[in-house]
Image (tube, helix red, strand yellow):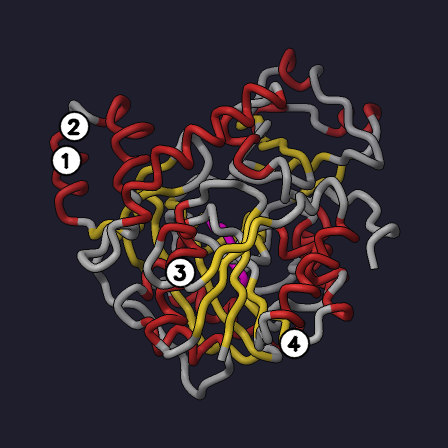
Amino acid sequence: MHALILGARAPACLEWARAFKAAGWRVTVGDSLRWPMTRFSRAICHYERLPEPHRSPADWIEALRVIVVEQAVDLVLPTCEESFYLAHGRHCIPCDVMTSDFKLMHRLHHKGWFAEMVKGWAVQAPETHLLETPESLEAITNPTDWVLKPAYSRFAQRTLLRPSAKQLRTIRPTPEQPWVAQRFAAGREHCSFSLLVDGRLTGHACYHPRYRVGRGSGIWFEPTDPPPIRAFLEHFGVATRYTGQIAFDYIEAADGRCYAIECNPRATSGVHLFDDQPVALVSALLGSEGVVTPTPTPRQVSLPMLLFAAHRHGLNGRFWSDYRTARDVIARPDDHGPLLAQLPGLLEIVGRAISRRCGLLAATTADIEWNGQSLNGAP
């Protein structure tokens, strides 16, 4: 069996590549970058450099179709926001495509529509308002009670946490670039990563991202298991019949009540919590019976911990204790290539940030992110 795994820049892709290799599959990975870390893993047999889906979705889908046909690929698995382009063009790919329905994924990706979808559930979003005109901001009478963010966004980019009135005036929402205002909820953060097949939960992990890159991606993962979150995933599966990878962010209030903040219908760092169960992880993706859950050991991405967290927390002894006790998700005794490839991969992203005149985090997804724009030109 042969798997094509997309998003080779992402540690999640590396995790999946190693899992499929352990399960006896041949693994090809693809990306638009020249030097993504997974390209250098011993888990893969081939690397395919792809067009940028953001620039030309049709060319990207056609490139995938050719690879699938010529290399006899049995399954295509996305890990990043190329998931949306793949879901939209999945009818052109002659093999199993591990995404859910595009319309459902769009509804989940849009932060306002997601909040409306889970209204009235046992775990629901905080009060959320969709902002599509400058006039809609007039409803936000006390900005410090709210969190404002683009309806399509990732890594907490452009998020305004309890903004001032001056910050509020910088927002110009439109129907094409909507924002949401979500009432601020205080509490402990949790993130979940789950696998579902036709709505049935087959794999589930929950964790607290104790350290992040800024306010964005978690880089240190402490396994947790609040019962309301597990129940939420089971209810979500029944309600949507979702298939594929999905992740949610939550706030657990002091009284134990959980709020679902937003959804990422794709892979996230939670997949690393299954690093010691690779065969079971692949089986769960393919629909095995039961629910695979992780062991309690913390995991981390060690290089970002040193680059982006140490300068903020390095004087705190707990930080270094956490650093020593967590297992790195990149380093493996039998697979050193990705560990060494992190530096050239980072330099390539820096080059993209400079050439595209954007921030470093924005450069990591500029070619694959989807912000609700029309895909009518795609297949």
Circle 2 is placed at which residue position? Answer: 316
Q: Disc 2 to disc 1, how far (Cα)?
A: 7 Å
The label on residue 95 is: 4
Mark 3 crowd level (few <14, some 14–19, many ≥20, 10 Å Cα): many
Label 3: which secondary element: helix
Which residue is pictured at 44% across the width and 78% down the height? 284
Which circle, 1 or 3, is nearer the viewer? 3
Circle 1 is placed at which residue position? Answer: 320
Q: Nearer the viewer, residue 361 or 70?
A: 70
Asked if marks 4 and 3 touch (Cβ < 8 Å), the reply is no
Mark 2 crowd level (few <14, some 14–19, many ≥20, 10 Å Cα): few
Q: Disc 4 to disc 3, how far (Cα)?
A: 23 Å
Which residue is pictured at 50% across the width and 80% down the height? 286
Mark 4 crowd level (few <14, some 14–19, many ≥20, 10 Å Cα): some
User: Does residue 150 appear in the picture of this structure?
Assistant: yes
Q: Which residues are magenta?
A: 245-250
Label 4 or label 3, whichever comes before in sequence order: 4
Tell me which amino acid carries mark 1.
Trp
Circle 3 is placed at which residue position? Answer: 271
Label 4: which secondary element: loop
Tell me which amino acid carries mark 4.
Cys
Q: Quick check: is 157 in the magenta stretch?
A: no
